[in-house]
Each structure stands twice: as structure tokens, then as C-alpha cells.
Image (cartoon, coloured by chain):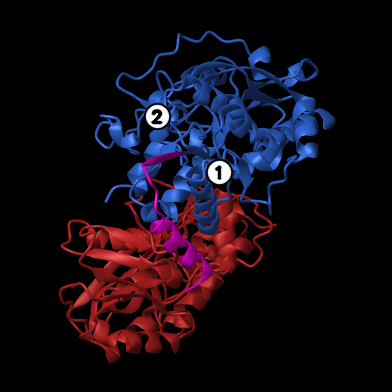
Chain colours: A blue, B red
Amino acid sequence: MSDIKKEAAILSQYTLPQPVAIMEVCGTHTTEFFRTGVKDIFPQNLRLIDGPGCPVCVTSNDYLDTAIAIGWQHNCVITTFGDMMKVPSSYSSLAKEKSKGLQVEVVYSPMDAVDMAQKNPDKKFIFLSIGFETTAPAEAVCVLEAKKKNVKNFFLLPGNKLTVPAVKVLLDSGEVNIDGFILPGHVSAIIGKNAWDFIATDYSKPAVVAGFEDHDLIRGTLMLLDLIKENTPRVLNEYPRVVRNEGNPKALEILYSVFTKGNATWRGIGVIPESGLDLKEEYADFDAYRQFPVDVPPPKEHPGCRCGELLRGVILPTDCPLFGKACSPEHAIGPCMVSSEGPCSAYYKYGRK
Amino acid sequence: MDIIVPGHGSGGKLMNDLINNLIKSTLGNETIQLDDAAHLKLATDSIAFTTDSYTITPIEFTGGTIGSLAVNGTVNDLAVLGATPQYISCALILEEGLEIETLKRILVSMKEAAMKAGVAIVTGDTKVVPKGKGDRIYINTAGIGVFTNPPQRREIKPGDTIIINGSIGDHGTTIMALRNNLTFSKGLSSDCAALNHLIEDVIRYYPDAIKFMRDATRGGVASVLNEITKNAPFGAKLIEDNLPVKNEVRGVADILGIDPLYIANEGKVVIIADKSYTQGIVEIMKKHPEGKDACIIGHITNEFTGKTYIQTKIGGKRILPVLIEEQLPRIC
């Protein structure tokens, strides 16, 4: 039997004295626990709670409302990662608006948007800058490149968020009883394992930074269960091949040379102070918020959608009365069903047997 | 550089020159002259007839062109029915501005594909659309095949095996990498190929073993199997350890956040066969270049009835749902 199969057998037979609930913070983990089949071999009394780690899901309606308004009212080309296309805004979605004639282009990297702007100097390109600490440095590099190349028709609509403040809010709320955390590998590659030490020191909970392969998920879960069982609040790193204790200081330096911390609105949580990234004053020329003021109708939530509670870990996707009925990937009511990292999407695709 | 102009579709001298000096001279042969209609002689009154249109971007890619794709796609649609492909039509819709040299390369690749598959291109049509009203070139091909030894399709049952003739996701990944300028994906190549000789061989040796046969094009292997299992009294189980996925394909798929099981192939056939004949079918496939990596990728089961699912490397199981829409790249 291979090592991974042995470890899988250890996990499936792991004895827990009482029911345990662990939270995976990252949206990619949500999907990978299903996709690799690791969730399928969990011991019976182990429950996985989905956290607020899908950047598309936590983006509030007013952000997309603003993007659509800028596109129409200022005749701009909206460039975005594909995940955002079908996410419902208050009244529409990028995909629906595109079919009405709004200029929307899917890109694979923010640099594609800079290239488009260079090749089409007569058009204005807005990049929807959403995502966590993982993507923010690349977006910062784009702004620096655009400035260096004097590209005056490329703009960002800042929507990036920081994961640590959101996890703190969840822990402070006491709304959910979480025994331990599986922490995001990609985010931690930037911010470092040490950025999470507060979970152990301030809240006496264990946590493990994990990678995304099947063996990472199994080992990460086993490490976390051992910490829980031994009642040892520590933060461990299962992913040292990518994540260092101090993270990536160079990436952080670039990130904070362009962005500054600001308040951000999280779907289901509300405004979390210092949890967002705004463009610094010296990059105001690239800030779509500042360059393209718009009239946006007040945002509205979709009746019955419980994505907010889901992102706080209060409910599972299957607890939502819309799940798989009124809300499915074909007719999504909430973003958690649309995004490839959304918990509802993962449950719908992989979790129904 | 010579390019397609509106006059090439006018019915006048320019059009006749294009047809006679390029299209007919490239695609035709001594015995068959491409005209508006062809008079065909068939050995049987049981025929298969198919049509398909091709609108791919880019029109030339590693491993093929829109021309070879059109021929092979139509040949494969006939072959998986158990028919022997014989005749093909070729209708070209050309956008003003297409380089004649590019068109020539595409026609040459069509001819080569037809010769390799042993089919004749016997009739055709050419239209020109104004600049901006097309995407360089569209091709429609219809095909006729004859049934000489059609497989007797028996009922699919638990225990039957799922076989494929080689690696999955090659074509779709190649196209997506080109579209997205993923320059690191140098080892990728489309699997665009005609499968009629391979399939005819399998049918010849194992006429009673094949219970299902389909080329896994759009939507990939998972979509083909979902078609079979929908509302069926059995499930289709794939074994992840057995899936032939090239490292280059895996790499690009990971970066784009897509699953190779749902990526298009253009030279892959999925066969469900009686378990006792499986090894023999795989050996027959391996004798053909298009089947050198043939293998068993799963089997039909009593569990998860009505569903296609995969047993992952660690022994977990997950459903492979019906694809909702085009797979989109993930954000991080």
C-alpha cells in the first residue's frame, strides 16, 4: 500500500472521543476536499465547516453593481476573472449585461488587462480586482507596470480583501463552535504561517496551514485532529515546501507599496475594519472608484439567499432551502453557487450522492 | 500576400480560379471531380449519414488544423456507429481577408486526413462572407458510411468495463493554451485523428463484445459517460489511478482550474464492453498508433445508479456531474 493510501486509512479510522468541527477557510480547500475524495473518508463524527475563503462569494453586491454602472455610464471595458461572470449583482450579472451589449472580457491574469489597454488606447479598461492576499501582489505589479509604461487607460476597481481580519471576526462572534482551522496555503505563502499564530495565542485554538494535493489535505487534517485530541493550541505548517513562517516579504512589500488597508464590506458579515485594500493616493489615477463616479441604485439582497450565513460557517449549503431547487449552477441565486470555489457549487457538483 | 476577397464568392472568374486551381486541385483526385453534387455507388442499402460544422479558433494548432479536424470529426461520428466511412462533402465559408496560403495549408491537411482515413471528398461548396462577418474560415462536412458488420449492441450491465484508446484532454487543453498564450505548455498537441481503422479492427475481432461506443469530443469523457448513466439502473465508475492524463495537460488544466475529464478530445473513443473481452480489445487498440496508450479506465457498477463517479487515488468517491456550461478559469 502506498504512503498516501496508508495515511488515508489512518484518517478514515481516526477515533475522536466526541464530535469535532473544523473549518477550512479557503475556497480552493472547500473544492479540493470534495474533488480528491478526502471528505469522503472522514471519520463519522468529523464535520467540515466552510469558511469565508471564496473571494467571489464574499464580494458584496454593491461592488458588482458599481462595476456594471461604470461600464455603462463611462463606456468602459470591464475585464474580470471568469468566476465573476455569472455572479448575481443586485439587479443583474456581468454575463447578462454582456448579452445586452456591455463590453466585458474574461482574462486569466490582471496583466492581460494591461496588455489590452496598451493595444487599444482608444478604450478604457477596468480590471475587477477581487481576491485575497494571493492575487493582490500580482494586481499591485500591474498598477506599477501600467504606471511605468504610462498606460493611462487601465484602471483597477479595488475589491481585494484580507483573510486574517475575517477569521478574527468569526472567532470573536462566537456564532459557530469551531474546534480547529485548516488554513489557506496560497494566502499563507504571501502572509506567512506566523500571521496565523494569533489563533493559538489569543483564542486557544489549533490550526494547520495546508496545501491542496490529496496528501496535503490528509496530512493537514491528521495534524489538526492530533492537536485537537491532545488539546494543544498551536499553529502548524503542513505546507513548508511553499509556506515560510515569515511569508514572502518581497510580495508583501510590493502589495503595500500600491495598496493600503481600508474598510471592506463582506457578504454576510458586513463591514470589517482594515480588511480591504484600497489604492494609495499616489495611484489614484488608476482607481476606477475615483476616476469614474457613478449613480448606483441601492444594493439589494436576493430574498431567501443564505450565502451570508454560509460564509460565516453558521449553516451548510444543504441547510439552505434554495439549495439545488431554486438555486443551482444554471440558475444561481447566490454567489456561493456560481464561483468555482463556492461551497454550494462544491456541494452541488460533488456532494450529492 | 494573396487574400480572400468578395470576388472569390461571386460566381465569376475569381471564384472559378479559386475552386479549380486551389480547392479541387488540392482535394480532388483522378477518379473524383468535386462538383455541386456527387453520384455515389454504395455496396449496401444500410448507410450512416452525418453532418458537422467546425468553427474553431485558432484555425491551425499543434496536431492539426480546422481542416483535419473537420475530416476526422466526421469520420469518427460515422465510425462510432459501427459504419465504414466512405464519402465526405466539404463546404467552406471563408471570411474576406483570409490568406490564400493559410487556406491552402488547411486544404492540404484535409486531404491528408482524408487519405489517412481512406475516405474521399466528393462534393463541396464555397461561400465568402464580408470582413467581420465570420471568423476567418468555417467548414461544414457531411459524411456517408456503410454498415458491413455493425456491432450487435447488447444491454450494459454491472461488471462491464470502460475502455479508452489513450490520453484524455489533449485537444481541448492545446486549444485553450493557445488561446490564452500559455507559453510554458510547449509539449501539448491535439489528439486530432481518425479512429475508423482502429474501431473497424475492434469490431472485426469482437463483434459481440461492444455494448457502447462514442467519441469523447465536447464535454470530454465525463459527459459521454453521463449520457449513458442518466436514468440508468447502473453507475459508471472511473478509477483515477488508471486515467491516462499527460503531465502537460494536467499542468495547464490545473492552472486554468478545469478538469481533464470534461475537456474535449478529437481522437478518443470510449467503449463499454463485456468484461471477458476487455483485454483483447485493449490489445487490438494498441496495434494502432491512435491506440498505443489504450487502457481500462473504469467499469459499470451497482452503486451510485444513474450517476458517473470517480474513485480517487486515496479511495474516496466523488460524483462527476453533468457539465453545466463551459468551464471557467478559477481566481486563485
Q: Which residue is at a point 40% across and 14% down the rendered structure image?
A: A300
From which residue to which does the magenta span run?
A1-22
Q: Residue furthest bottom?
A: B205
Q: Residue furthest right?
A: A148
Q: Are marks 1 and 2 on the same chain?
A: no
- In this rendering, would A270 be left or right of B101? left
Across and down, in percent, residue B15 comes to: 51, 59
Chain of the residue where label 2 is placed in the rendered structure: A
Q: Which residue is at a point 40% across and 61% down the rendered structure image?
A: B220
Nearer the observer, B110 or A147: A147
The kind of residue on which mark 2 rests is Leu
In the rendered picture of this protein, how many numbered marks are placed on residues?
Answer: 2
> Is A273 covered by the magenta stretch?
no
Q: Which residue is at a point 38% across and 84% down the rendered structure image?
A: B282
The kind of residue on which mark 1 rests is Lys
| Residue annotated with mark 1 | B131
Q: Which mark is residue A310?
A: 2
Q: Quadrant of residue B272?
A: bottom left
Chain of the residue where label 1 is placed in the rendered structure: B
Q: Which mark is residue A185?
A: none
Kind of element beneath mark 1: loop
Across and down, in percent, residue B12 comes to: 49, 57
Kind of element beneath mark 2: helix
> Is A2 covered by the magenta stretch?
yes
Q: Which residue is at a point 56% across and 35% down the rendered structure image?
A: A105
Q: Are marks 1 and 2 in contact (CB under 8 Å)?
A: no
Across and down, in percent, residue A121 comes to: 72, 29
Disc 1 and disc 2: Cα gap in Å?
50 Å
Residue A111 visible from this viewpoint: no
User: Is A136 drawn above or below residue A263 in the view shown?
Assistant: below
